[in-house]
Structures are given as C-alpha cells and as structure tokens.
Amino acid sequence: MIRTRGLTKDFAVGRNETVHAVRGITLDVEPGELVAVLGPNGGGKTTTLRMLTTLLAPTSGTAQVAGHDVVTHPERVRAAIGYVGQGSGAGTYQQVRDELVMQGRVHGMDRRAAGRRADELLEALDLAPQARRKVESLSGGQRRRLDVAIGLVQAPPLLFLDEPSTGLDPHNRANLWEHVLRMRADAAAAGRPMTIVLTTHYLDEADTMAERVVVVDHGQVIADDTADALKSDLAGDRVLLRAVSPGQVPALAALAERAHGTRSVSVDDAGTDVVTVRSADGARAVPELVRAADAAGLVLAGVQVVRPTLDDVFLALTGRSLRETAIDAGAPESSTESSTETTEKEVA
C-alpha cells in the first residue's frame, strides 16, 4: 500500500542554510496494516506524511501510495486516500451533514450517492443527532469524529491520521478509537481491508492498537517492528528486587550481576533498598533470581516485574525520553516543519 525508497525533504532556511527534515525514509506498509509512526517534535514524521499525501513534493527518493507515484500522479494518490490532519477539516458554519455531502460531491459522487454516504458515516460515527448542527457548535470529540468521517467519505483503502486525538480528554479519545477500529473491522469483514497510518504523541495508542511501530528521529527510521518486539529487544523487562534492608543491597546486586551480567543490573544512588535487573523475559528471570537469593541466604522483601513502555524503547534508542522531547502534545512539530506552510500552498 505504501512503498518509499530514500525519501528526503530539505527546506531552505534563510539564504545559506538548508535543513534536512527527512533524510532517506525507506518504508513498506502492506494492505490492511495499522502502523503507528512515533517520533519527537521536529523528527520528520509529519513532513513524511505530508509527502505521502502529496501536500509536499519530495526533494529526492521515490514514494508509491496505493500503487501510484506521489510526484507523477498525485491526483490518483488523492483519490485513493483519506487524510485527517492535525487541524479541523470542516467548514465552521456548515451544517454537519451538508459538509459530508459536499465532500462526497467533491469526490465525484452524485447528490443522492453523496447523501447516502453522509448518512452512513453519521450513523457509524455516532453523529446522526448532530446532522443539522453547525460545525462550530460541536464538541472537540464530535469535531474530530467529523474529521474522520470526511477522511472516509470516498471509502479509501488507505487512511492517514495525523495525531487525531491530540487535545481530547481520555473519554473522547477512547470513543474516537472505538469508532475508527469498528469501521476498520467492518471494512475487513466486507473484503475491503483498510490500511491506517497513524502519528501520535499518546504512546498507549500505538502500544495497544498498532500492529507495527515505526520510530522516526532526525528524519530517519531508527526502528520498525511490533510494539512487543521493540520492547523486548530494545528495552526489556525490569525486575525489581526489594531487600529487607539497604545493607543487603550490595550482596543482592552482586548476586544479580553474576546471574545476568553487570550491565543488566542497577542500584538507585539514593540509597533505596531496590536492585533493578533488566531482562528480556522478566517472568522467566524471577524464579532464577529468587532461588539464587535463597541459596545465598538473602531474604527478599518483594519482587516486581515491570513491563517496558514504548517510551523506554525510545530512551534505549536515542538516550532521551519521547515524552521529554514533546514540547506540547498539541503543538506543531517544530518551527522547521511549521515553515512548510508556504511550500504546501505552492504544491496544492
């Protein structure tokens, strides 16, 4: 569904400076996949999405989306995709149903077909009671569901969601995703698999819903796998061994180092009674560590296995936390990526 090779995007900043926003993205996405693209603000993920949706022209490299080249056949790409950007795509003073009918007409439907499709989407996304309301009167969650409906008007096989739930409260976030995932399941059941490419600052969304996670930093793909595989390979479980007293910590740490290696063991400098052991499989490591402690005459006050998060993965890859690099979950990716506005208008 998506195939890129060496995709790059450069921006001129001032007279003599060039910013390399995307530095050779090579990526394949198969039909029906739900892929989450993670990265810090300014990392290149939104610029990449804008190239894949024909809003920006690549500097070099190639990209085929839904079987069409984004440079030579942008109109075919646009006909095959839905795109929900970070801002609202609906007209402020339009009635909700009229907005969807108009979108259907833009995609070449006659008025009757556009009306049927609008009613289908209103029902599917729980917006039927708001059909005659003006867009400006909708709540944040309702407006984002309307944005998704606009992206799905032409029943595209590929849907791009650029931070669709940013700014929503947890209830509205969950509600939005419940609707999106149900529609995706219905499309698959009807033999029309829907591919979704998602960018998000909410790591729990990527962790629980995406079948693949692609991590982008400094304009490059630095990791690409399932969330579980990335967490296991790059971060690992943390096994917390709690000693009965701080005085037993050195002996407990030495024991753990013999079992798992020096690099896998850490002790808090604050003088706590906890020894942390990194393990690819924490549940399997616990019995071994407990038996070793018992054989050495060390009594444990407690044992806890902490599963890694995708933020731990990003920390392992880059040495910094993804949460710490996000200036604001609702902010543009950076001044560099925000400066693409003029270029986008030129491409459009």
Image (cartoon, helix red, strand yellow):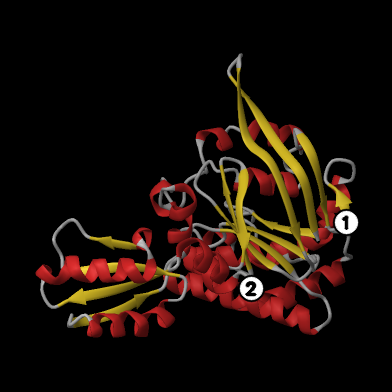
Amino acid type at circle 1 is Gly
Residue 117 % position (x, y): 78, 73
Tell me which residue sits at (32%, 66%) in the image.
Answer: 257
Q: Residue at x 21, y 60 (%)?
A: 268
Amino acid carrying mark 2 in the image? Val
Badge 1, how many Cα within 10 Å: few under 14, some, many 20+?
A: some
Could you tell me which residue is drawn at 29 percent across and 67 percent down?
A: 276
Q: Dividing the image into 4 quarters, which one contains the C terminus? A: top right
Q: Give how far apart the Cα atoms at labels 1 and 2 are.
A: 24 Å
Q: Which mark is residue 67?
A: 1
Q: Nearer the viewer, residue 251 or 2?
A: 251
Can you identify the residue that label 2 sits on?
180
Whether residue 192 is situated above or below residue 54 in the rendered picture: below
Q: Nearer the viewer, mark 1 or mark 2?
A: 1
Q: Position of residue 318 (x, y in %)?
A: 47, 48
Q: Is residue 98 visible?
A: no
Q: Secondary structure at mark 2?
A: helix
Q: The N terminus is located in which quarter?
A: bottom right
Decide: few, some or many residues near mark 2? Use Cα within 10 Å; few <14, some 14-19, many ≥20. some
Specify the quadrant of the image occupied by residue 209: bottom right
Q: Looking at the picture, tell me which residue is in the foreground, 309 or 168.
A: 309
Mark 1 or mark 2, earlier in chain: 1
Residue 95, compared with residue 346, is above or below; it is below
Left or right: residue 70 compared with residue 135: right
Judge left or right: residue 269 versus residue 288: left
Where residue 138 is drawn, which disc sits there? none
